[in-house]
Image (tube, grey):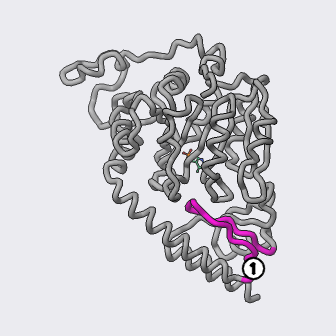
């Protein structure tokens, strides 16, 4: 194992930072008969008149049980987007440090790099949509703080090989962020089971996709206690609101409902793949480990507009590297998927 010291990666100002502390943090054990006159809240009960739990203890306890990860290894955010932004702000010095991304991939990494004034080194995936490990490691410098691996990857829908990921996590000198937004649609094991092996690993997940809760905005970050405590210093104290915590907990207490929906989506995905392969407009249907399918068609922009005219909105990815003439289809309900297949059949017929 290489020498790893997280202190060498944190921004100087964050090392010095004292987080905002609310009085409520200090008295949480005594909540039963306490009178709270500390936070200038309205005292009349309506379910949301109090500030939410800044550490989301109940949600984390349930996640901890489901994922077999201790609560001190978990941080929650207002969507993964907030979690990713916190990671930039904790580790990347603006106008100095860099990140590495592997296009084609999730657009938020570029947006966050721009917002945080952090240069982005792009190393394209190879033609099998796998990371080019040697090239990635060669292009890293001592300023390269973060490497983003999205697996299963958006928009290509494949999971990266475990061998490539392991090589990158064990050789890259900065922090490797594995974005597992789509992990629940894959048969591969999550990298959260390897957190203890890699002190430079952050795994992010979300309730937006498989858990069916994009509207509540809840992102999850799993990492070493050291990394989590750094991110806790940077996060706004009440970043996950009370309604989100209640809704998330309700859902997490019924994991069998979530599994059932995932199974239905996977069944529909496999049906869509077999139907798409029969269509003449379709040149390649890429394998999918996610709840969407990347498809190369004859003329993506034309087909995209024609689908819009038929009332179906898909994602045109043709301008992305390696994605020329590609459309991305999210797996919908059976009825929605039938409508898509019928529309594509009609377009192929004329
Ligand atoms: C959809 C998606 C997310 C989810 O982001 P949230 O902010 O949690 O909704 C994260 N990463 C990738 C790659 C995604 O496609």
- For residue 4, which quarter of the picture? top right
Mark 1 neighbour class, 10 Å CA radius: few under 14, some 14 to 19, many 20 or more: many
Residue 236 seen in the current view: no
58 lies left or right of 341: left
Tell me which corner region of the image, top left, top right, bottom left or bottom right, holds residue 22.
Answer: top left
In the depicted structure, whether residue 268 falls above or below residue 55: below
The residue indicated by pointer 1 is 281
Residue at 45 percent across and 53 percent down: it is 211
* Placement of 263 over or under 278, stated as above or below: above
Q: How many marks?
A: 1
Q: Check disc 1 and report its element: helix, strand or loop.
A: loop
The residue lying furthest to the front in this view is: 1
At horizontal 78% and vertical 58% (from top left) the residue drawn is: 127
- Residue found at the far left of this picture: 33
Residue drawn at (20%, 24%), measured in percent from left and top?
32
Asked if one can make out residue 319 in the rendered structure from this viewpoint, the answer is yes
Beta carbon at label 1 within 8 Å of ligand 1: no
Work out which residue is located at the far bottom of the displayed protein and give it: 349
x, y percentage for residue 66?
Answer: 36, 45
Is residue 283 a member of the stretch shown in magenta?
A: yes
- Residue 264 falls left or right of residue 104: left
**Residue 294 colored in magenta in the image:** yes
Give the extent of the magenta segment. Answer: 280-298
Q: Is residue 30 above or below residue 310?
A: above
In the rendered image, the quadrant that contains the C terminus is: bottom right
């Amino acid at each position: 194992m290489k020498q790893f010291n997280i202190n060498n990666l944190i921004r100087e100002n964050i090392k010095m930072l004292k987080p905002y502390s609310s009085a409520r943090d200090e008295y949480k054990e005594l909540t039963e008969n306490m009178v709270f006159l500390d936070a200038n809240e309205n005292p009349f009960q309506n379910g949301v008149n109090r500030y939410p739990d800044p550490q989301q203890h109940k949600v984390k306890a349930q996640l901890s049980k489901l994922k077999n990860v201790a609560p001190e290894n978990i941080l929650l955010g207002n969507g993964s987007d907030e979690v990713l932004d916190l990671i930039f702000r904790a580790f990347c010095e603006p106008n100095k440090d860099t990140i590495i991304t592997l296009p084609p991939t999730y657009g938020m990494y570029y947006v966050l790099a721009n917002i945080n004034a952090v240069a982005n080194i792009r190393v394209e995936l190879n033609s099998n949509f796998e990371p080019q490990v040697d090239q990635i490691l060669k292009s890293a410098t001592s300023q390269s703080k973060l490497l983003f691996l999205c697996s299963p990857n958006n928009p290509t829908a494949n999971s990266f090989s475990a061998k490539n990921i392991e090589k990158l996590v064990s050789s890259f000198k900065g922090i490797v962020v594995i974005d597992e937004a789509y992990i629940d649609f894959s048969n591969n094991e999550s990298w959260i089971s390897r957190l203890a092996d890699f002190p430079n690993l952050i795994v992010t997940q979300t309730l937006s996709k498989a858990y069916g809760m994009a509207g509540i905005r809840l992102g999850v970050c799993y990492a070493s206690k050291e990394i989590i405590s750094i991110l806790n210093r940077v996060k706004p104290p009440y970043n996950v609101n009370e309604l989100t915590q209640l809704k998330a907990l309700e859902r997490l207490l019924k994991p069998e409902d979530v599994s059932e929906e995932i199974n239905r989506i996977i069944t529909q995905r496999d049906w869509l793949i077999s139907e798409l392969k029969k269509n003449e407009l379709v040149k390649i249907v890429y394998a999918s480990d996610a709840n969407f399918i990347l498809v190369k068609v004859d003329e993506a922009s034309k087909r995209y507009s024609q689908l819009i005219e038929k009332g179906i909105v898909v994602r045109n990815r043709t301008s992305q590297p390696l994605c020329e003439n590609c459309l991305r289809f999210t797996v919908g309900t059976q009825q929605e998927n039938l409508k898509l297949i019928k529309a594509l059949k009609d377009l192929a017929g004329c």
